[in-house]
Image (cartoon, helix red, strand yellow):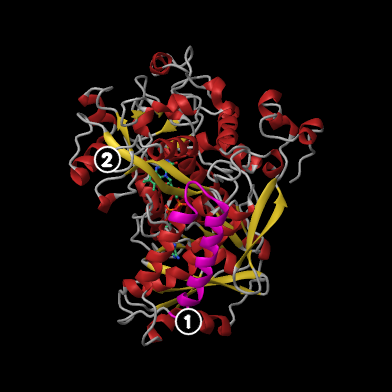
Amino acid sequence: MDTYEYDVVVIGAGGAGLRAAIEARMQGKRVAIICKSLFGKAHTVMAEGGAAAAMGNVNPNDNWMVHFRDTMRGGKFLNNYRMAELHAKEAPDRVWELEQWGALFDRTKDGKISQRNFGGHEYPRLAHVGDRTGLELIRTLQQAVVGLQQQDAREHGEAEGRIKVFAEHTITRLLKEGDRIAGAFGYRREDGGFVLFKAPAVVLATGGVGKSYKVTSNSWEYTGDGHALALLAGATLINMECIQFHPTGMVWPPSVKGILVTESVRGDGGVLRNSEGKRFMFDYVPDVFRPQYAETEEEADRWYTDPDNNRRPPELLPRDEVARSINSEVKAGRGTPHGGVYLDIASRRSKEFILKRLPSMYHQFKELADVDITAEPMEIGPTCHYIMGGVEVDADTQASIVPGLFAAGEVAGGMHGSNRLGGNSLSDLLVFGRRAGLHAAQYVDELGGNRPAVAQADVAAAEAEVVAPLEQSAGENPYTLHAELQQTMNDLVGIIRREHEVQAAIEKLAELAPRREKLAASGGRVFNPGWHLSLDMRNMLLVSECVAKAALERKESRGGHTREDYPQMSAEWRKVNLVCSVGPDGHAQVKKQPLPQMRPDLLDLFERSELKKYMTEEELAEPAAPSD
Ligand code: FAD
């Protein structure tokens, strides 16, 4: 086993992990960055539309308060208000900083960083690089890491002495001494060798959980590792019932079902039509959003050129609303031949415009589906895209309830409430990645010489857990178990939930859990995907239990949690966070916890008539004192 000692170990090399690592290193800490993919291949690379930041470059009326309001509305007020506030205030600085580090954003005619429209954002707000923004974000952050390494080489004679990347390494356990984090254990994917990282602070930046679902826009890495590592280390998760089904995934051919079609298509003028050619979104504007959305096609179309005097097209409602509307159209028999609806930009924008603004989408459809999006509509439908739920953290420091454990990015919960607005993830990664790195470094400083030690018995237990699937001579096939899990989550805890179905999912998960312990992976430890999946199954099953149990508990519909049997939002449920932990039996358990109450100065940013749609009379009668 290779053993390393660091001050801060960052698990994940997407936007959140890299930003956290850079910050911790800039605070003078020795930092390890660990990722299970190749360096530079994190999920963040796939982000297309852009990073939301109220810079006001395209519409000067934009500012942090408008962004804060949009984020709270998008999350249906289940957000941790303090995270939404910090995010809205700090996102512009983080985007500027990225530009100073070398990111090449698209420009406005007068040379400013250009910003595009996206669902739920009142003004054009997404800083972007065509439809390849995530790639540029990762490229820039990687370059910053390399810059720090070059500096270390010059000043200390060792490039990797203070910040080092461990690519293709998977962490399977966090290790503690008493309550406090002491390190992390894992294996090298290439040869199966074991690795031990001794460190008093760990930042989880492992992304999401989409691979628990059959139809998803997520890549292979999204097996809920960080969520499960946190739970198994004694941390808590919140909002796990809230899963975002992006309205526009590819539906055809079957091999590419679920792959994302960026929201920029709608932001740049694309519209949704059913099989009768009707622009159906006008029929689905909910009351809470009615004042901000156009009622006629003429007004909606005028908005693209004159947003100050017209209301937004309903295609740009938050994602949960659009996904449910598509679902209803298909269910009503007005879907396309392959079970989606049409997304049409061909009849609305010139070929040149589409090729310039949406080059990746053009190639994606041409190469994967033989569809020319400059000439014909796309067939699209909802796909599991993002989990709003994640590690319960302190809003300012990103610290979990386990001392030394921090979380940032998609693995952290709270910021997006019940539904994330497009573009708010990339800015979330930068804002809270930086905060996690900063506060992890401060935590290490406060410890001084009093660092926790890793116990040999814990390392031995972690090793035994990892080799178990290789030592079973005959047992369950990991691919079969994975397929059963994905089908269960897709069918029973999907976009529309019903009590008896969620209950059935929980029963199925209880049946899969003991089968997981009998997983057998043939072959050895040298790059063995069956073995890797066997180990990932622990995480996906545990996280899916959290999702299903929280989905059963929350008896209302809000954002990324739609209950057919409780179709309305409930002001009482808005006051509640569902908190998941691991019970004594090793299974997920859910309990209710009060949501932090919004500060009066932030409440004042909203009309009271709007707040009444979300909050109880009693909450509105006495504005609460700050609760954190
Ligand atoms: P990631 O970038 O996923 O990184 C996770 C890292 O953790 C990886 O390096 C992985 O290897 C590592 N890891 C995971 N488990 C382990 C383990 N056990 N051991 C070691 N390493 C591990 N958001 C926007 O704001 N704007 C957009 O335009 C946008 N477009 C999107 C397009 C697509 C197709 C998709 C799928 C998502 C999009 N999103 C967008 C969402 C956004 O991209 C993600 O939420 C975000 O990139 C997550 O970043 P992260 O840093 O949290 O995690």
Is 308 drawn above or below residue 373 in the view shown? above
Circle 1 Cα neighbour tier, 10 Å, few/some/many (<14 / 14–19 / ≥20): some
- Mark 2–mark 1 distance (CA, rounded to whole Å): 50 Å
Q: Is residue 392 left or right of residue 99?
A: right
First to last magenta residue range: 491-518
Front residue of 289/326: it is 326
Circle 2 Cα neighbour tier, 10 Å, few/some/many (<14 / 14–19 / ≥20): few
The answer to whether residue 527 is magenta is no
Is 228 drawn above or below residue 301 in the view shown? below
Q: Secondary structure at mark 1?
A: helix
Residue 101 is labelled as: none
Question: What is the quadrant of residue 289 in the picture?
Answer: top right
The answer to whether residue 500 is magenta is yes
Residue 337 is labelled as: 2
Q: Is residue 46 left or right of residue 118?
A: left
Q: Secondary structure at mark 2?
A: loop
Looking at the image, which residue is at 23% across and 22% down? 350
Is 498 drawn above or below residue 188 in the view shown? above
